[in-house]
Amino acid sequence: MLDGTPLLRLFAAARLRRMQALDPAATQEALLLRLLRQAAGTAFGRAHGFDAIRSVAEFQARVPLRRYEAMWQEWWKPAFPLLRDVSWPGLIPYFALSSGTTSGTTKHIPVTAAQMAANRGAALDTLAWHMAAHPRSRPFGGLSFMLGGSTALEALAPGVRAGDLSAIATVEVPRLLRRRAWPPPRLSLMPDWDAKLDAMAREAPRDAIRVLTGTPSWLLVLLDRMSRDGGGLPFPNLELLIHGGVAWGPYRDRIAPFLPRGCATREVYPASEGFCAIQDRGEGEGMRLVLDRGCFFEFVPVEELDGPNPTRHWAATIETGVDYAVVLSSNAGLFGYVIGDVVRFVERAPPRLLVTGRTAWMLSAFGEHVTGEEIAAAIASAGAATGTAVAEWCCGPAFAGSLGRHRLLAEADGGDAPRFAAAFDAALVAANADYAAHRAGGQMLAPEVVLLPSGTFAAWMRAIGKAGGQHKVPRVIADPARFAAAASGLTDAATGRAGP
């Protein structure tokens, strides 16, 4: 196969100069106004006066914030699945199926050809940042392996299909790049996740893979299976692992033994609604906001999100150290759309952020107001204090008579659950005054921790039909009934009673 890296180097050099020269505010405002012009003739655009909007401030005054449920009920559901000129010109050809990790509701997110082109551009930007840090790398000297979802596309109507975003991306890979992409469609669209993993582990051209992309939790399953089946490093010539979707920290040390010396890792922030950010510097230094690839971003302080007049920041007004809910308007017909993620900026120019959680990641069944970020930090603290390595976990409320507690189910081989629970409790007390007051006042019992063997969460996700691809373990489940059902399923999976 001809090494395409010299062409990539030319693109990377030109693109890096372009990205580094972008003025964040001017670029984002120009992009927003272009989106509004394109969508002015749609039903949504006419209803919100897109043709009269000349600034970000005018857009924010005319277009209210909406979550998926409101956009679905008011605009998409009445015409579904034939969304023609509803919020984006023409017929929407795809819907990405996205399971809400906190609500459990499957969403149908519109996907357009323009959005897929923008996503491909952002993927090339990821390689450009990699080349800047590793100029001697040859990522196009072999194949790129994308570990995507297992859901084949379902025909909803003539010209309209639905499935995982990764499945849509597979179909939309340009013909010129298909020779460099692996796995082939016959494998990538296999509906049975375990059969697909077995086939990929068996058939992967190990020496040819230079770039590997996927969600860390499922990458770990694949790499472990390949290591056991074939011995040695799964991909001895791998130069770049691109990861996103879940926090990298719990997986870093587990995945490292499967990577060859010198293999780089790079984090990305792709949502079903649009490609948001790319790691452009070192690990932990934040991801750079993608300014010119089809998405206009707004950021609302989390505590204001459900208020009557939330403050809507954008590239010109963001501040560092503030937890913001992400809002985007895109070339898929989303406008003022709350995607559910929470980020915190570590730098303003250029805008560089960390993903810190979800807007619904909070436990307050007993008035404790504990955020998902605080729970994750407490797990890390307890793990360090007790020498227990935790990757997958799920936490929710549990009642014991008139009182309640937090119940944490965590995947960790070995470990002392009572010691871990005490350290977890202490970390939450130190981090959250409301939680500390409820514990000291006797309104809440000490947390319960259940340590589960490796593979439990993967088996549970398989049993509930959410194996692989973009499906993520629900970390925080605030609804007691949903959490009880999840806990029961995890217990079954741990004891081998879960379905295959």
Image (cartoon, helix red, strand yellow):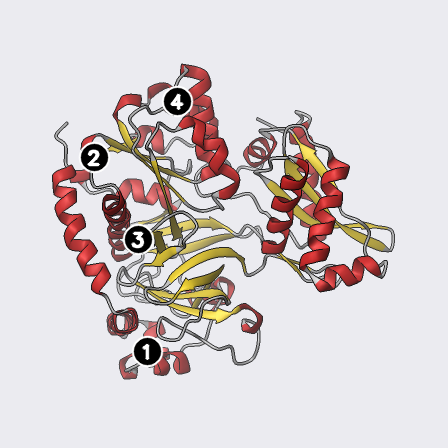
The Cα–Cα distance between marks 2 and 4, rounded to whole angstroms, is: 23 Å
Residue 135 placement (x, y as % from top left): 21, 41
Q: Nearer the viewer, mark 3 or mark 2?
A: 2
Secondary-structure class at tag 1: helix
Q: Residue furthest top?
A: 230
Q: What amino acid type should be assigned to the residue bearing mark 2? A: Arg
Q: What amino acid type should be assigned to the residue bearing mark 4? A: Ala
How packed mark 2 is, by other alpha carbons closer than 10 Å (few <14, some 14-19, many 20 or more), is many
In the displayed structure, 429 sits above or below 473; it is below
The Cα–Cα distance between marks 4 and 3, rounded to whole angstroms, is: 32 Å
Comes first in the chain, label 1 or label 3: 1
Kindly indicate whether the residue at mark 3 contacts the one at mark 4 (C-beta within 8 angstroms).
no
Instruction: Give the numbered dot on residue 201.
Output: 4
Residue hosting label 1 = 46
Secondary-structure class at tag 2: loop
Q: Nearer the viewer, mark 2 or mark 4?
A: 2
The Cα–Cα distance between marks 3 and 2, rounded to whole angstroms, is: 35 Å
Comes first in the chain, label 3 or label 2: 3
How packed mark 4 is, by other alpha carbons closer than 10 Å (few <14, some 14-19, many 20 or more), is many
**Is residue 217 in sight in this rendering?**
no
Look at the image and tell me in which quarter the C terminus lies: top right
Comes first in the chain, label 2 or label 4: 2
Instruction: Give the numbered dot on residue 138.
Output: 2
Residue hosting label 3 = 93
Residue 181 placement (x, y as % from top left): 25, 34
